[in-house]
Image (tube, rainbow, N blue to C red):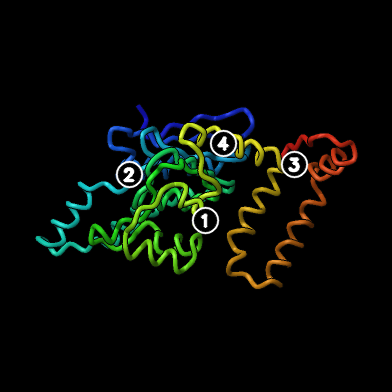
Amino acid sequence: MAIVDVDRRDDGVVLVTLNDPDRRNAMTVEMGEAIEATFGRLADDEDLRVIVLTGAPPAFSAGGDLAMLEDHARRTRDEGFDATADMRRFYERFLAVRDVPVPVIAAINGHAVGAGCCVALACDLAVVAEDAKIGLNFARLALHPGMGGSWLLPRLAGRQRAAEMLYTGRLVSGAEAADHGLALEALPAAAVLPRALALAGEIAASSPLVVRQLKVALAVSPTNRLDEQLDLEAANQAVNYGTDDLVEGLRAGRERRPPDFTGR
């Protein structure tokens, strides 16, 4: 049984499932290697339009691998081991979810804690179960946040809310997480994956070239000046003017029908 399952849909949507339910989809080295390999392959798929990332029930991911953390602690104390490089490489494997050129939607169907929460926050959009537990509990373990938690959380929740959550290690409900901007919406657990797939279908119906352009534009907009973003927008539109999809989009608009985009 694969630790990461891939289900390709006909509309360019791919469902990726973290599949280690006995360990509540813990962030093990094995899981990280599987995520890196899976998202690396998907990044090269020209037909890919959207990825939905979820976890095999009962959790999205309950967090880091405690056995790995205990081993690092033992080696550091007994052997003077420096875990810096190991942890940096560990983060990179999981944050491969950010390296694909299409949107990734996190379907947070259950608890997303610690490193598992970081992976969810690294996605472009998220739908969360109302009663899921969400948060970065690193401080409660006497461990500094990793996996980009101290970078991702302030950008989504704001500085004050992120500081409170990080300093206290407090877990919040999915409903509260959505209120804080960590997810698009909170729903009953059974509705999370269907809603994420429906949202993916809506995105997949848009121009795949424009969606890929937007992935880049949204990534750089927080640090770009307005004039830099205007230059980027103008350059992207100049590319769009030469595409078959723009011809189709304009024709569909005139004919008042849904467009049929090919990505060309």
The location of residue 165, given as percent across then percent down, is: 38, 61
Residue 195: mark: 4
Q: Dot 1 lies on which element?
A: loop
Q: Closer to us: mark 1 or mark 2?
A: 1
Q: Residue at x 54, y 34 (%)?
A: 14
Q: Residue at x 77, y 56 (%)?
A: 237
Residue at the disc numbered 1: 181
Residue at the disc numbered 3: 264
Task: Check whether the beta carbons of the residues at disc 2 and disc 3 lie within 8 A of each other.
Answer: no
Q: Dot 2 lies on which element?
A: loop
The location of residue 2, given as percent across then percent down, is: 37, 30
Q: Residue at x 44, y 38 (%)?
A: 109
Say if 181 sits above or below 161 in the image. Answer: above
Could you tell me the amino acid type at mark 3? Arg
The location of residue 6, given as percent across then percent down, is: 47, 32
Q: Dot 4 lies on which element?
A: helix
Could you tell me the amino acid type at mark 1? Gly
- Sequence-first tag of 2 and 3: 2
Residue at the disc numbered 2: 62
Q: Label 1: how many residues lie within 10 Å, few (<14), some (14-19) or many (20+)?
A: some
> Farthest left residue?
78
Q: Residue at x 52, y 33 (%)?
A: 191
Q: CA distance from mark 2 to mark 3?
A: 41 Å
Which corner quadrant holds the C terminus? top right
